[in-house]
Image (spheres, grey):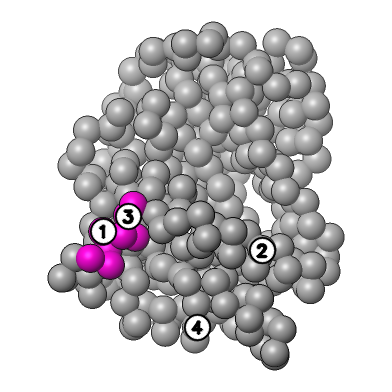
């Protein structure tokens, strides 16, 4: 499926950016830890997540089509330059073999797992109630460090995206403070934009913020974007060694492409943690416990009820995108 150079990046990055679709036809982009979960012979790339993040899992399963951007070598296991975008169809895997692989590989990237009387109880939902999400790869897009397109492996790139999606009911303009959003995004070293491409898969593009005004942000993408307007997600983030200490700002909003690229943020979510391992583990455990108590996600309920769940449950990628 892909070259040795790409395989080195897939195996080495500590953090990647996952993009998935929303029911309105937009995209959300969020950081994940791939932990080197990939299989070149089978053409799969994966990541692990806690079942406490059930809403994310449900959205991934509902749309099926996802993308992962391997965009930074920071604190990873390789220094090979380049930007690698993997696009494909997601399936959730709860098999013991998949979870054993996570347990074996996680210390290589995240350090020794916390154990002891307190941590065993506090982190039970975070460590044990997990799934692996595999991406059946359809396409790998490789860009050089300067943003130029290197090569495409697998399916050819689609044509131009439609010039205009249906605008949001509440208007295209910002609904959160755009100036504040611009400052927060510009402070982070990793800034990524995601939207649904012409073939229905999300795509991810690195961007810089040029200006931030009350009516929106002016962006400079690493390569040209389609003209017209569409829903899009924006992520700005940073992280420390073994993901101890992090900052992430996630937005959804309206993207207007063309000679000048404008972005109007509609929703905002932020998380910031100091480089303190104990505090990071406490928060991970709290989020996982709350998510588990709030109920099992729909896709996990199906996965555990199906008689062939041992193979994982494929997401319905043939379903038309909303």
**Residue found at the far left of this picture:** 307
Q: Indicate the secondary structure of the residue bearing disc 2.
A: helix
Point out the tag, 4 or 1, that comes first from the N-terminus: 4
Compared with 316, 195 (above or below) is above
Number of residues whose C-alpha sits closer than 10 Å to that of mark 2, classed few (under 14), some (14–19) or many (20 or more): some
Residue 222, image x, y percentages: 58, 35
Residue designated by label 3? 299
Place residue 73 in its image quadrant.
bottom right
- 298 or 230: nearer the viewer: 298
Disc 1 + disc 3, Cβ < 8 Å: yes
Given this view, does label 3 or label 4 mark the residue nearer the observer?
3
Q: For this view, does 49 lie left or right of residue 173?
A: left
Name the residue at 41% across, 79% down. Answer: 99
Compared with 15, 164 (above or below) is above
Q: Indicate the secondary structure of the residue bearing disc 3.
A: helix
Is residue 226 inside the magenta stretch? no
Residue 139, image x, y percentages: 31, 50
Number of residues whose C-alpha sits closer than 10 Å to that of mark 3, classed few (under 14), some (14–19) or many (20 or more): many
Number of residues whose C-alpha sits closer than 10 Å to that of mark 1, classed few (under 14), some (14–19) or many (20 or more): few
Residue designated by label 1? 302
Magenta span dominant secondary structure: helix
The span picked out in magenta is 298-305
Q: Indicate the secondary structure of the residue bearing disc 1.
A: helix
Q: CA distance from mark 3 to mark 4?
A: 23 Å
Name the residue at 33% across, 23% down. Answer: 160
Q: Quadrant of the C terminus?
A: top left
């Amino acid at each position: 499926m892909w070259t040795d150079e790409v395989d080195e990046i897939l195996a080495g990055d500590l953090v990647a950016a996952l993009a998935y679709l929303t029911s309105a036809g937009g995209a959300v982009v969020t950081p994940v830890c791939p932990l080197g979960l990939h299989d070149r012979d089978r053409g799969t790339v994966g990541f692990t997540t806690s079942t406490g993040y059930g809403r994310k899992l449900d959205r991934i399963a509902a749309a099926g089509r996802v993308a992962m951007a391997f965009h930074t070598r920071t604190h990873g296991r390789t220094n090979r330059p380049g930007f690698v975008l993997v696009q494909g169809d997601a399936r959730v895997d709860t098999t013991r073999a998949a979870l054993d692989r996570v347990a074996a590989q996680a210390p290589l990237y995240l350090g020794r797992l916390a154990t002891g009387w307190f941590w065993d109880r506090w982190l039970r939902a975070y460590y044990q109630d997990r799934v692996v999400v595999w991406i059946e790869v359809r396409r790998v897009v490789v860009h050089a460090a300067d943003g130029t397109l290197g090569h495409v492996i697998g399916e050819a790139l689609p044509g131009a995206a439609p010039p205009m999606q249906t605008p949001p009911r509440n208007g295209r303009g910002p609904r959160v403070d755009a100036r504040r959003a611009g400052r927060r995004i510009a402070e982070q070293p990793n800034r990524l934009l995601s939207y649904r491409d012409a073939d229905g898969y999300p795509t991810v593009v690195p961007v810089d913020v040029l200006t931030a005004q009350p009516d929106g942000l002016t962006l400079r993408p690493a390569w040209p974007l389609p003209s017209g307007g569409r829903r899009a997600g924006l992520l700005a983030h940073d992280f420390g060694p073994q993901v101890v200490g992090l900052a992430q700002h996630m937005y959804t909003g309206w993207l207007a492409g063309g000679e000048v690229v404008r972005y109007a943020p509609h929703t905002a979510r932020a998380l910031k943690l100091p480089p303190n391992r104990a505090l990071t583990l406490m928060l991970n455990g709290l989020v996982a416990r709350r998510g588990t108590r709030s109920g099992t996600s729909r896709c996990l309920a199906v996965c555990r009820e199906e008689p062939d769940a041992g193979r994982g449950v494929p997401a319905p990628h043939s379903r038309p995108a909303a």
